[in-house]
Amino acid sequence: MKAIIAQKLLPSIKPGVGRVPTCEIMTFSTNIRKYLLEGQDDKLADAIRIGKDEGMQDFTMSLRDLVEKDMIDRPTASRSPQRRGLENGAEGHRSPRGGNPVTDD
């Protein structure tokens, strides 16, 4: 396995575009592999944010990007369950259930 990608479709505000995906991407970097093998799931959210230059992103980063590109509005982003930290500018998503932030719904 090379990566895990999770997505949710959100209504778009751009004319002619019905829905747009907000995506979380976790590639299997050295750190991600280590955390998974050692059962350190609590470190995955930070590793995803740190891995931005390696193509990783969490849902909050994706939501922020969609708002900046005028694809969704702030209320839509704020209502998204994946929006943790969006209001205060902090990036990141931690699962409220304590599981892997990539695979939780």
Image (cartoon, rainbow, N blue to C red):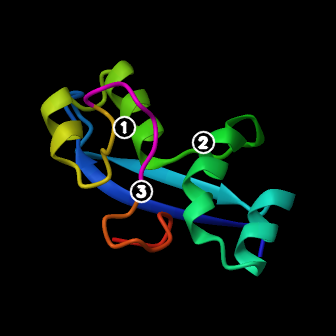
Residue 63: image tag: 1
The residue sitting at 81% across, 69% down in the picture is: 34
What residue type is disc 2 on?
Arg
Mark 2 or mark 3: whose residue is earlier in sequence: 2
Rendered location of residue 41, percent (x, y): 59, 70
Foreground pick, 4 / 87: 87
Rendered location of residue 75, percent (x, y): 13, 33
Contact, mark 2 vs mark 3 (Cβ under 8 Å):
no
The residue sitting at 31% across, 33% down in the picture is: 86
Foreground pick, 98 / 67: 98
What residue type is disc 3 on?
Arg
What residue type is disc 1 on?
Leu
Against 90, residue 56 (above or below) is below
Question: Residue lying furthest right in this view?
Answer: 30
The residue sitting at 45% across, 74% down in the picture is: 99
Around disc 3, counting alpha carbons within 10 Å, would you say few (fewer than 14), some (14 to 19), or many (20 or more)? many
The residue sitting at 59% across, 48% down in the picture is: 46
Mark 2 or mark 1: whose residue is earlier in sequence: 2
Residue 49: image tag: 2
Q: Main secondary structure of the magenta part?
A: loop
Rendered location of residue 44, percent (x, y): 61, 60
**Screen quadrant of the C terminus:** bottom left
Inspect the magenta stretch and tell me whether residue 59 lies in it.
no
Residue 77: image tag: none
Q: Which residues are magenta?
A: 87-93
Q: Which residue is mark 3?
A: 94
Foreground pick, 18 / 60: 60
Please tell me in which quadrant of the rendered image residue 29 appears: bottom right
Around disc 1, counting alpha carbons within 10 Å, would you say few (fewer than 14), some (14 to 19), or many (20 or more)? many
Q: Is residue 7 left or right of residue 85?
A: right
Separation of marks 2 and 3 at Cα, in angstroms: 11 Å
Mark 3 or mark 1: whose residue is earlier in sequence: 1
